[in-house]
């Protein structure tokens, strides 16, 4: 069973019990579907409920409606997982909205500016 996967704009790796995801490049509405299918397929075979999602290299081009749809979609996709987002300073508003979407589903999510702090929060 492979514990890593890459496609244009998306990487997945299992490292020390944490599923590490990374999004990069221009991200438009609908771009989340292929990575979500890959995540669903691979994560079902991994023994982890921890996600470290690095979006610092991603540039989202979404309308307000598209943001709302994406945030609900990702929160449902990561249902049952503890999720740490690694963000740039200009992504704070979107990350806050993402964390609220997770909370509405009963899941924990938090945003960080460093990978180390995010990993520490996940594994504590």
Image: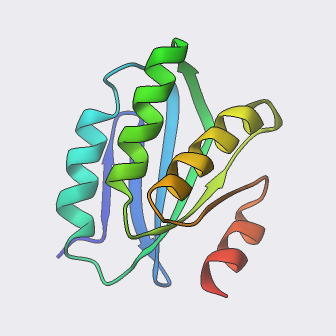
Pick out the residue farthest to the right: 89
86 to 3, vertically: above or below: above
- Residue lying at the far top of the rendered structure: 63
Q: Which residue is nearer to you in this view: 72 or 55?
A: 72
User: Is 114 on the left-hand or right-hand side of 31?
Assistant: right
- Residue most extreme to the bottom: 124
Q: Residue 59: where, in percent of width, then height?
A: 59, 24
> Residue at 62% across / 76% down in the picture?
122
Give residue 58's quadrant in the image.
top right
- At which x and y percent is residue 83? 54, 63
From the viewer's side, name the closer residue of 11 and 65. Answer: 65
Residue at coordinates 71% horizontally, 79% vertically from top-left? 120
- Which residue is rendered at x = 40% and y = 28% of the image? 69
Q: Quadrant of the N terminus?
A: bottom left
Say above or below: 67 vs 100. Answer: above
Q: Residue at x 61, y 84 (%)?
A: 123
Please indicate whether residue 115 sits to the left or right of residue 11 in the image: right
> Can you say whether 102 is above or below 89 in the image?
below
55 above or below 44?
above
Q: Is residue 27 visible?
A: no
């Amino acid at each position: 069973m492979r514990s890593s996967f890459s496609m244009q704009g998306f990487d997945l790796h299992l490292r020390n019990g944490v599923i590490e995801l990374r999004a990069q490049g221009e991200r438009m509405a609908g771009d989340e579907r292929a990575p979500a299918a890959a995540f669903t397929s691979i994560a079902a075979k991994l023994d982890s409920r921890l996600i470290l999602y690095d979006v610092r290299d991603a540039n989202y081009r979404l309308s307000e409606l598209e943001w709302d749809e994406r945030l609900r979609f990702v929160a449902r996709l990561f249902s049952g997982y503890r999720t740490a987002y690694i963000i740039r300073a200009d992504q704070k508003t979107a990350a806050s909205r993402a964390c609220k979407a997770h909370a509405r589903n009963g899941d924990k999510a938090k945003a960080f500016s460093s990978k180390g702090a995010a990993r520490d929060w996940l594994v504590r």
